[in-house]
Amino acid sequence: MRPALQGDMHMMVSRPEQWVKPMAVAGANQYTFHLEATENPGALIKDIRENGMKVGLAIKPGTTVEYLAPWANQIDMALVMTVEPGFGGQKFMEDMMPKVHWLRTQFPSLDIEVDGGVGPDTVHKCAEAGANMIVSGSAIMRSEDPRSVINLLRNVCSEAAQKRSLDR
Ligand SMILES: O=C(CO)[C@@H](O)[C@H](O)COP(=O)(O)O
């Protein structure tokens, strides 16, 4: 039977340990948890891998990137939140961009995602800082032309990534 879920599950939950197996069984191929939500990130990373999924590690705005750095070589994606987790439609926190830039400098091939308040007005900042993946909710859903917004967001990120690889 075809799995019900595919793609990355961003688990904005406490005790993320309890959902690893159910997500794997449901067909998720990446499991992203919050560093703030677990006391043992190493064990959780291992469990996610043993369940056949890639690993994403998210940090909230109040968490400095130094807490994520020790795990960066063991994960597939770092997720820098640019709003407080909770709901869509919040204002993009530009002061999170140094985290993205630092991660990109230290870990050139890591997937780096930005989530919260990302749209046509803010995506350039994310892409220039080094994000190659973005989450965008309101900017797409509130647009009269969602397709063109998606294309714009995609193009800005891929052009910045291409420029980085040429500069290397
Ligand atoms: O879930 C969250 C924040 O809790 C984010 O994924 C946002 O919901 C993204 O939506 P916009 O900020 O783009 O509206």
Image (cartoon, rainbow, N blue to C red):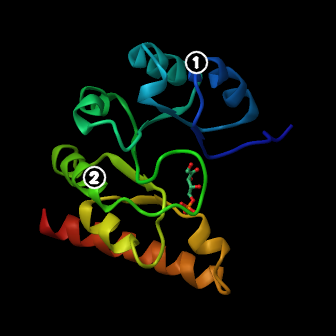
User: Which label number is shown at residue 112?
Assistant: none
Q: Element type at marker 1?
A: helix
Helix or strand or loop: what does disc 2 sit on?
Answer: helix
What is the spatial separation of the Cα atoms under label 2 and label 1, in whole angstroms? 26 Å
**Quadrant occupied by the C terminus:** bottom left
Q: Amino acid at mark 2?
A: Val
As drawn, 119 above or below 93: below
- Image point 37% across, 44% down: which residue? 61
Measured as percent of width and height from the top left, residue 100 is found at: 27, 52
The quarter of the picture where residue 24 lies is top right
User: Residue 166 at x, y = what percent?
Assistant: 18, 70
Q: Where is mark 1, residue-wise?
A: 17
Count of numbered marks: 2
The residue at the point 86 percent across, 37 percent down is 1
| Mark before the other along the chain sequence, 2 or 1 | 1
Name the residue at 52% across, 45% down. 85
The residue depicted at 25 percent of the width and 48 percent of the height is: 99
Is 20 drawn above or below residue 104 in the view shown?
Answer: above
Residue named by callout 2: 100
Please name the amino acid that badge 1 sits on.
Glu
Q: Quadrant of residue 126?
A: bottom left
